Amino acid sequence: MIALSATTSLKSGFDLCPPLAQFKLMNPFIKKLLWLSHEIGREDRHLAILGEGNTSADAGDGTFWIKASGGNLAALAEEDLTPVRFDAIAASLDDTTLDDSGVREVLLASRSDANAKLPSVETFMHAVCLQEGGAQWIGHCHPVSVLQILCSRQGAAPFLQHVFPDEIVVCGRHLGVVPYIDPGIELARAVRSELRRFREEYGGTPKVILLVNHGPVALGQSEREVLNILLMLDKWARILVGNFALGGPEFLPEKNSTRIDTRPDEHYRRAQIAAQQ
Ligand SMILES: [Zn+2]
């Protein structure tokens, strides 16, 4: 009798949770992208609310998956992700004649699954970051902490120097910066120019691009690295805001920042942090 009721309650509990059962059967790549989206969208983190922000990842087969337009990161489901062909986006990136409806046509035509939803308007920017930015995973959001600075008269300037070691280890020695540009294809072209300038100046790719009056983009090699970058950037921004309230930040000397960036033990620590699950 006891055994029967235990079985019954287990079965009915399972029946009540079909989304959980579905999640277990899901393709691991999609599962990771949904995990990243949910983590960024968590209400207590104040990184994104409502339809803000977007996530994407390179599937390694000429396509990348990105949040569909209007989706809510915190509650994103598999059907809110759209597979997009890189070649279709790259072919339109330099077409300056495209108006809003033309952009929408390109976005619809770029889907590798005709039943998938319209991809985010930031699809062009994600394609650029995944291809020219050398990233495998991307997270973009509108954190309260970071926007307190990016929307102030200071703009991105406070992030061009460092105040504590871990933000160098996780967010990188140098950050990319793009002034405010209308979101969409024009912003993607500006991000591409910044990635090229960055490569020329520093010989690599940034882990963070700050879009002034808009929000950060995190470029990672794993879904975990993207979340780590955004969490550390959020902490960095909150520290800076506190510093400005107490007479201004005491920035680390450039030579100390460069030293932290190049120390072998910090390279080891960086790899350990990136591998954390
Ligand atoms: Zn945005």
Image (cartoon, grey):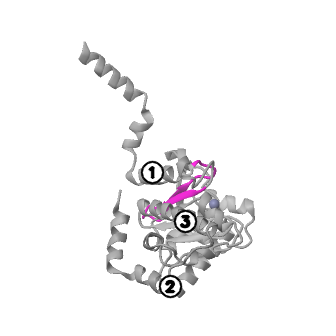
Q: Is residue 102 above or below residue 78?
A: below
Q: Residue at position x 39%, y 82% from top?
A: 262
Q: Is residue 17 above or below residue 25?
A: above
Q: Judging from the image, what secondary structure is the residue with disc 3 in?
A: helix
- Kind of residue sitting beneath label 1: Trp
Residue stretch in magenta: 53-72
Which residue is labeled 1 in the image?
A: 35
Instruction: Find residue 169 and report its horizontal and vertical position in percent.
Output: 42, 72
Comparing marks 1 and 3, which lies closer to the viewer? Answer: 3
> In terms of sequence position, does the residue under pointer 1 or pointer 3 come before the other?
1
Residue 89, quarter of picture: bottom right
Which residue is labeled 2 in the image?
A: 254
- Kind of residue sitting beneath label 2: Glu
- Kind of residue sitting beneath label 3: Ile
Q: Residue at position x 44%, y 70% from top?
A: 166
Task: State how far apart marks 2 and 3 are (Cα).
Answer: 19 Å
Residue 208 among magenta residues = no
**Front-most of residues 192 and 209:** 209
Q: Is residue 42 above or below residue 204?
A: above
Asked whether residue 150 appears in the rendered view, the answer is yes
Q: Judging from the image, what secondary structure is the residue with disc 2 in?
A: helix
Residue 239: mark in rendering: 3
Query: Counting other residues with Cα less than 10 Å from the Cα at mark 1, is it few (<14), some (14-19), or many (20 or more)?
Result: some
Instruction: Find residue 71 and report its horizontal and vertical position in percent.
Output: 60, 48
Q: Residue at position x 58%, y 52% from top?
A: 68
Q: Is residue 18 left or right of residue 245?
A: left
- Furthest toward the top, the residue is 1
